Amino acid sequence: MVGLIACAGKSTRLFPSTKFLSKQLLPLYDKPLIYYPISMLMKVGITEIGIVTNAENYELYKKQLGDGSDFGIKLQYFLDSKPMGTIGSFKVAEQFLKGQKVCFVLGDNFFYGKQFDEQLKKAVTNANGAYVFGYPVKNPKAFGVAKFDKQGNVTELVEKPSNPPSNMAVTGIYVYDEKCVDYANACPLSERNEYEVTDLNNMYLKNGELKLIKLNKKNYWLDAGTSEGLFLASEYVRKVIKKNKTQIGNLDEIAYTQGYITKQKLEQNYQSLKKTDYGKYLEKYLK
């Protein structure tokens, strides 16, 4: 299975901060936002990851992350010169994805929780059809939302409904089998003139191949693509780090504990990080 992270949007919800910089390169507390989706993929064993970005930020991502070898993974970059919705990422990275199972992540979504990690790993391991993750929200009009029948089965996914059929938002991480590229290519342009991930998910649902995994409040999910969301996610990470004396999204730690890099490589990476709290946290692995 490969991973694909969508980072090609214009980040207009965060203007003026993102007028010339992708929001996924902004800091979410102590590291760039892009570290968090990469860390989720690495933790479930996905080491080949594509990042879809726009012309303004293409070289910046490469400078920030390189080819992934610092973390024992392989990163590839795909240029979306005319972003047209989330599923546009599938069209840009078609050759990378063709014939592969895919874990697709919207780069501005933040997830945290032991249950979430376990459920994502289970979905990645099974990966038949499609898996989406639902989370109850107070403002369902802002998201893709699940509609249920009386038995609690998902009957439809609705994108940003004016009259939401439920408060169960579909979050920004999805697991698809090998049919995803063909399904994505069959998606029509929406009324917003975009290729919507909701349309892709409804194709799987129509064929009886979609499963919705409900995340409870013991997990934490936030759309960090707004000023408020980015602040709240940063504050959450800060609190977890201070309380538990741990790190979230530390790619060097995950790379080492997952066996993607050696202790020697970790020590090499540490040299440029040792003045930071991010780097000092790694010292326990270098003793």
Image: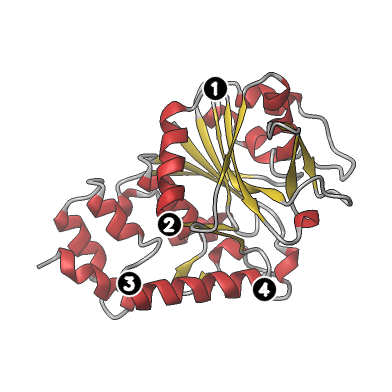
Q: Amino acid at mark 1?
A: Glu
Closer to the chain start, of discs 3 and 4, is 4
Ranked by sequence position, the earlier of labels 4 and 2 is: 2
Between the residue at mark 1 and the residue at mark 2, the CA separation in whole angstroms equals 27 Å
Q: Earlier in the sequence, mark 1 or mark 2?
A: 2
Image point (52%, 31%), residue name = 96
User: Gap in Å between the C-alphas at discs 1 and 3?
Assistant: 39 Å
Classify mark 1: helix, strand or loop: loop
Image location of residue 236, percent across then percent down: 50, 72
User: Would you call the spot at circle 3 few (<14 residues within 10 Å), some (14-19), or many (20 or more)?
Assistant: few
Is 148 left or right of 264, judged from the image as shown? right
Residue at 69%, 18% (x, y): give it: 207
Q: Pointer 1: what residue?
A: 178
Within 10 Å of disc 4 (Cα), the crowding (few <14, some 14-19, many 20+) is few
Q: Which mark is residue 65?
A: 2
| Residue that numbered label 4 is attached to | 227
Q: Please state which of the two labelled residues, at mark 2 or mark 3, is closer to the viewer.
A: 3
Question: Which of the two residues, 227 or 143, is positioned nearer the viewer here?
Answer: 143
Residue 76: x percent and y percent? 47, 43
In space, the residues marked 3 and 4 are separated at their CA atoms by 26 Å
Instruction: Spot the residue most to the left.
Output: 287
Residue placed under numbered mark 3 in the picture = 244
Image quadrant of residue 35?
Answer: bottom left
Decide which of 136, 263 is in the foreground and name it: 136
Q: Tag 3 or tag 2, which sits nearer the N-term?
A: 2
